[in-house]
Image: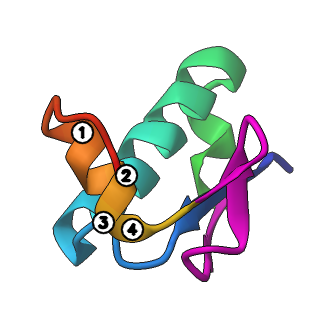
Amino acid sequence: MPLVTVKLIEGVFSEAQKAEMVERLTEAMVAVEGENMRSLTLVILEEVKGGDWAVGGKRMTADQVKAIAAGERPT
């Protein structure tokens, strides 16, 4: 029974984006393990509070991640 866990900074992704993540991750697992595993594939999205996530020793917020996604340099 596959379990896929994804940790995200809270407030970065919309509900529609999270639904798409679940769908695509499920499809990826089914592509590897076969259609019979679809009903047994669990995907968990865990949101972490902004500032409780760090990259390269620097704490990241949702606004910083959104800036990066937009091609901007985060502050």
Label 2–label 4 contact, CB within 8 A? yes
- Pointer 4 or 1: first along the chain: 4
Q: Are marks 3 and 4 in contact (CB under 8 Å)?
A: yes
Magenta stretch: dominant secondary structure:
strand
Quadrant of residue 45 within the rendered picture: bottom right
* Viewer-proximal residue among 35 and 61: 61
Q: As drawn, which residue projects farthest toward the front?
A: 75
Residue 44 placement, left or right of 8: right
User: Which residue is drawn at the image coordinates 23% and 48% (left, top)?
Assistant: 67
The residue segment tinted magenta is 42-59
- Kindly identify the amino acid type of the residue bearing the numbered disc 2: Val
| Residue 59 spot, x, y in % from top left | 65, 60
Q: Residue at 74% across / 35% down in the picture?
A: 56
- Marks 1 & 2, CB-CB < 8 Å contact: yes
Decide: marks 2, 3 in contact (CB < 8 A)? yes
Circle 4 sits on which residue? Answer: 62
Q: What is the image's colouring?
A: rainbow
The residue indicated by pointer 1 is: 69
The kind of residue tagged 3 is Asp
Q: Circles 3 and 1: CB distance less than 8 Å?
A: no
Nearer-the-camera pick, 48 or 24: 48
